Amino acid sequence: MWNQLALFIFGEKIGADLPARVREAITEQQIASERLIGWVQLVLVVTFGALYALAPPPAEMATFRLEPWALGLYFAFTLIRLVCAYKRCLPRWFLVLSVVMDVSLLMVLIWSFHIKYNQPPTFYLKAPTMIYVFIFIALRALRFEPRYILITGGVSVLGWLALVLFAVSATPGDTMVTRNYVTYLTSNAILIGAEVDKMISIVVVTLVLAAAMLRAQRAFYRAALDHSAAEDLSRFVAPEVADRITSADRAIQPGDGELRFASFVFTDIEAFSTISEKLTSAELAQTLNDYFCAVGQIIDNHGGIITQYQGDAILITFNAVTPDLGHAANAVRTATAIKELCENRTFGPHQSWLLTRCGVNTGDASVGAIGAEHRLAFTVHGDDVNVAARLEQLNKEFGTYVLCGENTVEACPDLCKFRPVTEITVRGRQQPTKVFAPLD
């Protein structure tokens, strides 16, 4: 029962085992919040000081002046707090001390009113300055921790209770307590119900704001976790794919996809098995990382999206995830650039040559998620994708490193010249597909 009620009021609880990078992001946000709180406090104290300096004192006012001392002390404390916030040295005890300092200075300032105006202590209970406690309570909402809201509200209630008790007991034999509302408004008498109402208002505002902040804190933590997960996801799949997944209006389901006219490049390293035999696992990983970084830069430069890694092979798409009007030309540019790269440099600690074969094709494909409900892969599939894979393999037979389908050649006639190589009939098709190789 309590768990259901807590879930309804405060929202879903976040586990304590947050990843370190998420905790660091939350800490940075809290530091930024403390800096903002410091600046708001500085603006408040400067504003109060300006109003005090511009307002002429009444003729009947006593010579006692506590405001300049209180404002000066608060100004100095605010500057120290702001400097500490920028130096990232605000321990929790200092934050609690800051709350106590804020409320205490306000309460002392209110208490001084009866001396300032030569009135009995009950006089200060009618001071509208007490509503400033709500400013201090709200100020703590800038930090995503409800405990400081509760501390501020609790200190404010205790402070006002102390002022009420002092006012009642200040004049021996005369508590000045009344039950007449008119008498309360037109004299210095105390209406206990009115003071209780003020303290109840502080408590209610504090509890409501703390509950709202706890809900916001948990939502913020979930958002930080989701953001961290999205950043991690973009390291395993293309950022464009990650953005498409995380910004979808509903959770992507198996089979969700759309038909796109796009271009595809399959790459595969020639004789990779033979190369792998000569390297240790660590050396092989380092060689592949070196290779993938160089090839990935070429792909990024031409607007391609790495849709899938499979061992040393890569599936690259153009116009499948992000719009690309020149997708066929960019696919050919990418394939020829990869070929030139691998012919002119080596990779890894042993300076291995990784000559790469590429198959390029253009056509319709389904772009979306496939797999089980709890295990999905975002990829492209269709006959024209299969043709690109078949063209990559066909390079072995003709001693070439880049082969293109006729759809790709027709889509970029002005890019370069192509020479016909052969015709193949892909499984599931009746008409043969013409195959071309770009001329250097």
Image (spheres, rainbow, N blue to C red):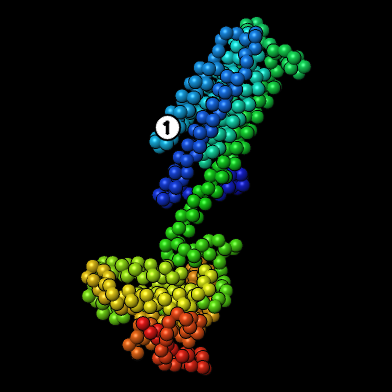
Near-viewer residue (251 or 396): 396
SS at badge 1:
helix
Near-viewer residue (27 or 344): 344
Quadrant housing the C terminus = bottom left
Locate residue 288 relative to residue 388 in the image: left or right: left
- Kind of residue at disc 1: Val
Near-viewer residue (196 or 379): 379
Residue 283 higher or lower than 31, as above or below: below
- Residue at position x 44%, y 47% in the image: 25
x and y, in percent, of residue 341 in the image: 32, 74
- Residue at position x 22%, y 70% in the image: 350
In the rendered image, is residue 250 in sight? Answer: yes
Residue 38 higher or lower than 349, as above or below: above
Residue furthest toward the top? Answer: 173
x and y, in percent, of residue 356 in the image: 33, 78
x and y, in percent, of residue 396 in the image: 34, 87
x and y, in percent, of residue 316 in the image: 44, 74
Q: Which residue is mark 1?
A: 83
Near-viewer residue (417 or 350): 417
In the rendered image, is residue 91 in sight? Answer: no
